[in-house]
Amino acid sequence: MHEMSLVTYVLNAVENKASGMGIEKVGEIGLVIGRLAAVPELMERCFQIARYQRPMFQEATLHIEMRDIRLRCRECGTEYSSQDAFGYATCPECGSGASDLLGGKELLLDYFVPAKEQNTGNV
Ligand SMILES: [Zn+2]
C-alpha cells in the first residue's frame, strides 16, 4: 500500500531525529500532506498499524494538515486551488481545464514532540 510506505518513511525520519535528540518515546507527530500525495484516512490507519511494531511510537498520535491542490491555468495564468483528490478542476476565470500543477504532492514532516512523561526539559 502506498500510504504504508509513506508512514514507514515518516516514522524512520522521526525515529532518526528523535533518537539523535535522546528522545525515547514520541507523543505527537504533525504532517503536512498535499491532497495528491496521500489519503489522510489511509495514513491514519497505516500509522495505527505501524506504531504497534515500534516501541518509540506506541503512545504517539498523528496530526495531519491537508494542503489543497494548487493549479495554474495554461490559458490565462490564473492560480487556483482544488480539493478534488484526482486533481480535476477548471479555471474559475476562463473555464479552461488545461492547467499546470503547482502543489498538492507535498509530504512534509511539520513537527514531532516527545511523550509527556519523559520531558527532557528542553524547549
Ligand atoms: Zn483560465
Image (tube, grey):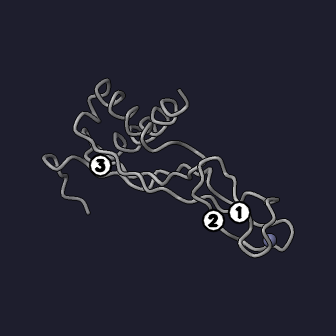
Residue for point 16% across, 50% down: 116
**Alpha-carbon span between mark 3 and mark 1:** 31 Å
Task: Please identify the quarter of the rendering in which residue 90 is found.
Answer: bottom right
- The image's mark for residue 14 is none
- Left or right: where 48 falls relative to 92: left
Residue drawn at point x = 76 percent, y = 74 percent: 78
Residue drawn at the location 65% of the way across and 58% of the way down: 103
Q: CA distance from mark 1 to mark 2?
A: 6 Å
Eye-nearest disc, 3 or 1 = 1
Dot 2 falls on a residue whose secondary structure is: strand
Percent x, y of residue 74: 84, 65
Q: Which residue is mark 3?
A: 28
Q: Residue at the spot x=70%, y=59% of the render?
A: 89
Residue 94 at x, y percent in the picture: 80, 73
Q: Which residue is mark 1?
A: 71
Of badges 3 and 2, the one in the foreground is 2
Farthest residue to the right: give it.
75
Horizontal relation, residue 42 to residue 115: left or right: right
Mark 3 or 1, nearer chain start: 3
Label 2 sits on what residue type? Ser
Q: Amino acid at mark 1?
A: Leu
